[in-house]
Amino acid sequence: MRKRIGRTAAAYPPRVAIVGALVAALLATAACTGTMPPDAAAAGAAPTSTSAPTPSATPSAGASSTPAAPVPDTLRFTGTTLTGSAFDATRLAGRPVVLWFWAPWCATCASQAWTVAEIAPKYRDTVPIVGVAGLGEQRDMKNFVTEFDLGDTPQIDDRKGALWKRFKVTEQSIFVIIDRDGKVVHQGFLDGESLTARVAALAGA
């Protein structure tokens, strides 16, 4: 009977060495293709996103981030100026406003007109002064505006008396002062000096 001669341990490569060689071959293949091995991605190396960026919630440069001021009932009215332009009082919300009710034949109104013409441009952005012309003809109202240089101040044509009735004005010359919250804080006569002082105080408030 022939005796089987076994191979020595040295003739077999160790199992650990074989496994190591296989792993090295896999890594080399992955490096050539440029594909990240699944194990590496799972380890926390996130791939670069190719999806479109999420739109930003930040307002555009042209949009205002400041909310509009609430419109009080006292400023919820519209009209037409003596020049034919539309007038919307809601745009004045958030600021003190002075309404001046006058008539073209009124001597007292004429004496106050110079003060209005002087201070209205100065406080146009802080305390707008708006004329409300009534109790007369449009031609006379326009002549009044021209004579007293009131062209830079909005003058509403209220020949029908809609705003005079709204604010319960029954005589001229009357100033209605509305604060920035929409509350009427004065309604009545004011001479030039008093009007100037009140408007200056409102502008600084």
Image (tube, rainbow, N blue to C red):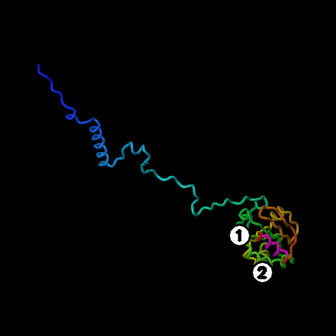
Point out the tag, 2 or 1, that comes first from the N-terminus.
Answer: 1
Q: Amino acid at mark 2?
A: Glu
Residue 86, quarter of the rendered image: bottom right
Residue 2, placed above or below residue 143: above
Residue at (41, 45) in percent of width and height: 41
Q: Residues within 10 Å of mark 1 (few under 14, many from 20)?
A: few
Classify mark 1: helix, strand or loop.
Answer: loop
Q: Residues within 10 Å of mark 2 (few under 14, many from 20)?
A: few
User: What secondary structure is the stretch in magenta mostly built from?
Assistant: helix
**Observer-nearest residue: 81 or 112?**
112
Q: Is residue 198 magenta?
A: yes
Task: Give the Cα distance between marks 2 and 1.
Answer: 19 Å
Q: Are marks 2 and 1 in contact (CB under 8 Å)?
A: no
**Observer-nearest residue: 49 or 45?**
45
| Residue 84: mark | 1
Residues rendered magenta in the picture: 194-202
| Residue 147: mark | 2
Residue at (84, 79) in percent of width and height: 111
